[in-house]
Amino acid sequence: MTSQDELKKQTGYRAVDDYVKSGMVVGLGTGSTAYFAVERLGQKLKSGELKDIVAIPTSIRTKEQAESLGIPLVTLDTHSKLDVAIDGADNVDPSFNLVKGGGGALLREKMVELAAEKFIVIVDESKLCDGLGPGFPIPVEITPFCHEHTIRAIAALPSCAGCQPVLRMGSSSNNKVDGDEIAITDNGNYIVDLHFSEKIKNASKMAKDLKALCGVVDHGIFSGMTTAVICAGAEGVVVKTADKKDKLIFNLAVASASIGVVSVLAAALSRRR
């Protein structure tokens, strides 16, 4: 197991240990970090430490993993309110705005996570950023019908100025070109990844403009949703909540993440205690 995989495992396990209790309805995210949260939930159900849990997966591959672990599954059709959802993110800024959808499950993730009372984001320190855009392309799920027209309309939005839209090819589960066919999501749609060389000036405005554009199903900007971010780095795992003090400390973590140092953050949290 690589060191980055170990960091992902630490955050996934910590999220389940800290936020999941018996009797809950739990949203299960998608991706390499969320994988470990699903794994931990399966372990605790098998051991009897957790009971009477039902879960809602956000993708076909998460559904298959959960089924293999014996996790009881339901859908939003039967359970419209969740106690907690746990998922990774491709980028997290100091205001807890997220970029998600690198794994192609952004629509189902957003539907499930908006329905949760608490949304716990699990990342390693490499995902911290001081502004959305340059660190990871913004995925936008669009309808196949006249998709080239929709891509042009997205690029023409003033709030998307400077973006380079790239239609995802090959597998929908990553934004690398790994095939000759257009990538298809679990919902039968396409994904266009918006590449930025500079920070997005107004992510909230861009999110609203994208959502209002005919042909766009949804986008990978998740704003105002996060309850807590569990971040793992070389110095351990730290939980940051959406209060002002933690956001100030988060800024320190962003400043140090580029050189792989999270000790500044851990020391700051220690002083708070």
Image: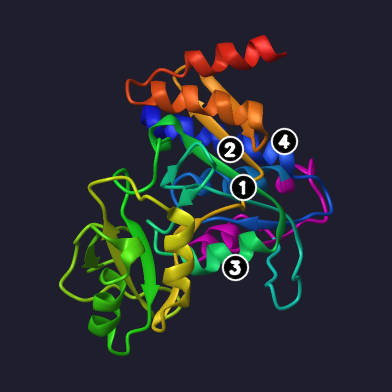
Amino acid of disc 4: Asp
Judge the density around disc 2: few (<14), some (14-19), many (≥20) Cα neighbours within 10 Å. many
Q: Which mark is residue 106?
A: none
Please tell me which residue lies in front, 201 or 150.
Answer: 201
Q: Would you call the spot at circle 1 few (<14 residues within 10 Å), some (14-19), or many (20 or more)?
A: many
Residue 57, image x and y in percent? 59, 63
Q: Secondary structure at mark 2?
A: strand
Q: From mark 2 to mark 3, how far is it between C-alphas?
A: 19 Å
Which numbered disc flags the more N-terminal residue, 4 or 1?
A: 4
How busy is the neighbourhood of tag 4: few (under 14 within 10 Å), some, or many (20 plus)? few
Identify which residue is drawn at 53% across, 31% down: 231
| SS class, disc 4 | helix
The amino acid sitting under disc 1 is: Thr
Q: Position of residue 225 (x, y in %)?
A: 62, 53
Residue position for label 4: 18
The CA span between labels 2 and 4 is 12 Å
Nearer the observer: mark 2 or 4; the answer is 2
User: Considering the image in quadrants, where does the C terminus appear?
Assistant: top right
Please identify the quarter of the rendering in which residue 187 is found.
bottom left
In the rendered image, the vertical position of residue 266 relative to residue 43, given as above or below: above
- Which residue occupies 61% across, 55% down? 69
| Chain part drawn in magenta | 45-71
Residue 229 marker: 2
Say if the magenta span includes residue 66: yes
Residue 63 in percent (x, y) is at: 56, 65
Amino acid, disc 3? Met
Q: CA distance from mark 4 to mark 3?
A: 23 Å
Label 4–label 3 contact, CB within 8 A: no
Residue highlighted by disc 3: 111
Cα gap from disc 4 to disc 1, whole angstroms: 16 Å
